[in-house]
Image (cartoon, rainbow, N blue to C red):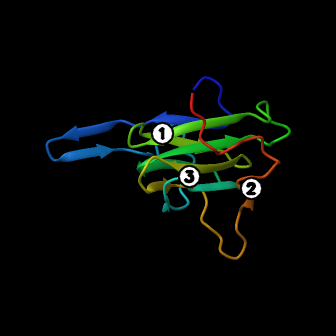
Amino acid sequence: MKNLIHGASIKPLRVMPDERGRLMEILRNDDPVFQKFGQAYLTTAYPGVVKAWHYHRKQTDHFCVVRGMAKVVLYDGRKDSPTYRMINEFFIGELNPSLVVIPNLVMHGYKAIGTEEVYLLNMPTELYNYKSPDELRLPADTNKIPYDWTRTDG
C-alpha cells in the first residue's frame, strides 16, 4: 500500500508449510512494529457482519485474521495528523496473511467478507480495563466518517 495513515503499518506474514502443516509468525518482540504486549484476544464475525467504529486513547492494536477474510478499515480523524481524513482499506486473512498495526486515536473496524466466519486475533499494547475501557465507539453507519461498508463491484 503506497499511502498509509500516519503511524499505521502493514506487515506481510510469511507462511512456512511442510509435510506436517504450516507455521506463521505474526508478531515478534524484535519486529520493527512491536511496541509492547498488553494481551491477546480472538474476536469473530459472521459473514457480512461489520464491527465498527472505535478508537483507543492509549492502545495500539495489531490485527491478524487467522481464519477467513476481512476488510479492515482505518480512518484518521486526528486533526493534527499529516494524514488527517485519510482512509486505508486492508483485505487480510487466509488469502493474504498480514498484520495491520493500528495506532491509537485512529478509528477502525472490520467487515467479514466471504462465506465463512472470520477469526481475528488482536494483540493490543494495553490490557483491557473493564471498569474504564480505553475506547470511543461510533456506529458503523455514522456520518462522521466518510465511508460506506457496502460492497462495491468493479
Residue located beneath label 3 in the image: 36
Q: Tag 2's secondary structure?
A: loop
Residue in the image at 74% along x and 49% along y = 105
Q: Is 112 positioned to the left or the right of 17 in the image? A: right
Image x and y of residue 133, in percent:
70, 68
Q: Tag 1's secondary structure?
A: loop
Decide: is 109 above or below 127. above
Residue 52 in which image quadrant: bottom right
Please, which residue is most extreme toward the top here? 2
Residue located beneath label 1 in the image: 31
Q: Is 23 positioned to the left or the right of 142 in the image? A: left
Residue in the image at 65% along x and 70% along y = 129
**Whole-Å distance between the Cαs marked 3 and 1?**
11 Å
Tell me the amino acid under the disc marked 3: Lys
Q: Earlier in the sequence, mark 3 or mark 2?
A: 3
Decide: is 54 above or below 31. below
Tell me the amino acid under the disc marked 2: Arg
Residue 131 in which image quadrant: bottom right
Judged by depth in the image, the label closer to the viewer, 3 or 2, is: 2
Residue located beneath label 2 in the image: 57
Q: Earlier in the sequence, mark 1 or mark 2?
A: 1
The foreground one among 44 and 12 is 44
Question: Dot 1: few (<14), some (14–19), or many (≥20) neighbours within 10 Å?
Answer: few
Image x and y of residue 119, in percent:
44, 56
